[in-house]
Image (tube, helix red, strand yellow):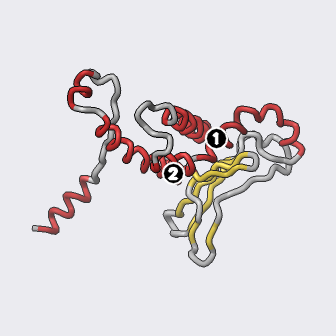
Amino acid sequence: MSDAWLMIDSVHRLRELLQQLPRLKKNQAELQIFLKRTSKVEDLRHFFQHFRNNIDAFAEKAMPLWGTLSWASTDPTTGDPVNFTLIPGTFFPGAISSGCAFSTPEGTFVDRILLDAGAITIDLAYLADHVSEFCYWYTNWFGAQFSEAERNEHNAADMNLRIIVKNVRKASEEMKEDR
């Protein structure tokens, strides 16, 4: 659960930093899309920072203090869709919780990793997708902002890493099939 809240705080800080970058224009389309897609992070972080003022109200409404964390999975033995939910801070009877939404026609969960706190819900898997997509664009944008001389003069004060992981076993199997 702490990792879920750490992710919210980290994306909040990323949003703050991006809006202060000298060469990144505030009206840059990719930045605006990223900020819009991650806007719920601000609401969740604000909730988390100030929830101590509402602890009694949460207890009266039987709401978990730290929210709920739910994730969808597949039972490895049956193949059935399964929803797991972690509900910390439920030391009182009758606590309410939420879980991942299920699509009956498709037979799958709509949500992947859901953090629900107060009146705010965010799918952390989609949040990670949005961060990854923006970072891919940002890596290319950042590289284009500085000349070779500027990059050399910087002496690697800033690092921007992108690591691509390839499944070696899958690649070797594909090579065997090609033979």
Residue located 38% across and 42% down the image: 138
Closer-to-camera residue (56/42): 42
Quarter-wise, where is residue 106 in the image? Answer: bottom right
Quarter-wise, where is residue 145 in the image? Answer: top left
- Residue 83's x, y, as percent? 62, 60
Element at badge 2? helix
Horizontal side of residue 90 vs 108, given as left or right: right
Quarter of the image with the C terminus is: bottom left
- Say what amino acid the circle numbered 1 marks: Glu
- Residue 163's x, y, as percent? 31, 42
- Residue 21's x, y, as percent? 45, 32
Dot label at residue 42: 1
Element at badge 1? helix
Residue assigned mark 2 = 33
Closer-to-camera residue (53/30): 30
Category of crowding for the residue at label 1, using alpha-carbon neighbours closer than 10 angstroms: few (below 14), some (14–19), many (at least 20): some
Task: Tell me: residue 141, above or below residue 167.
Answer: above
Residue located 29% across and 40% down the image: 144
Task: Tell me: residue 71, above or below residue 23.
Answer: below
Horizontal side of residue 68 vs 169, given as left or right: right
Closer-to-camera residue (24/87): 24
Which badge, 1 or 2, comes first in the chain's sequence?
A: 2
Horizontal side of residue 17 vs 161, given as left or right: right
